[in-house]
Amino acid sequence: MNLIMNKNGIPMTDSKMVACVFSKVHRNVIRDIKKIIDSSGDFGLLNFELSTYKSSQNKMLPCYLMTKDGFTLLAMGYGTEKAIKFKIGYIDQFNEMEKVLGDSISLSKQIDKAMLSYSKDKSTASYCGTGLSLWKKKRDDHLDKINKLKEGYQIKLDLL
């Protein structure tokens, strides 16, 4: 049973799942969510989204999707031993989904960085002919400077 779903890159669950796992009547879970939305201002609007599902009688009924923060606030009100054990497992699953999504974002950033580096090197390569001519003129100056620095770095022993 998947407790957490990925909705547009955001880990979420729904009120039906909460009702099932906490052995609550779904309409009572919806009532609890509505109380949170009514009393929490922007928090409720940002963390609960009204949705629908098709019942076993093929009726469209309301349910709520919720973020980790929305679930956490809702579940804090349920205090049975079963609820506490479940909350710990639930938090673990949310954290795992966040890690998976984070790894995907990290990989995407690495790909973007690699493509940018490729583009820069490609641009540099187009200037190679001009750059090579300039390099030939500057190379000896660089080597002279390096050799002088190396000579100054050597320990000088005056044995004679």
Image: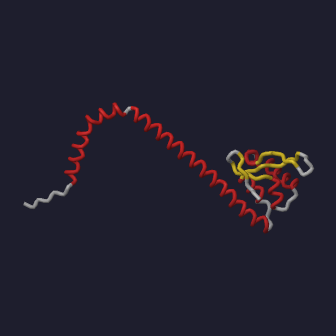
Q: Residue at x 40, y 35 (%)?
A: 125
Q: How many marks?
A: 0
State the scheme by which the image is colored: secondary structure
Q: Quadrant of the N terminus?
A: bottom right
Q: Quadrant of the C terminus?
A: bottom left
Q: Position of residue 129 (x, y in %)?
A: 34, 32
Tell me the quarter of the picture where residue 50 sits. Answer: top right
Q: Position of residue 60 (x, y in %)?
A: 88, 45
In the displayed image of the protein, which residue is found farthest to the left? 160
Q: Residue at x 76, y 45 (%)?
A: 45
In the displayed image of the protein, which residue is found farthest to the bottom? 81
In this rendering, would 1 be left or right of 120?
right
> In front: 60, or 45?
60
Q: Residue at x 75, y 64 (%)?
A: 86
Q: Position of residue 56 (x, y in %)?
A: 90, 52
> In front: 119, or 25?
119
In this rendering, would 12 be left or right of 114?
right
In the displayed image of the protein, which residue is found farthest to the right? 57
Q: Residue at x 84, y 55 (%)?
A: 29
Q: Position of residue 5 (x, y in %)?
A: 73, 52
Q: Is residue 73 above or below residue 137?
A: below
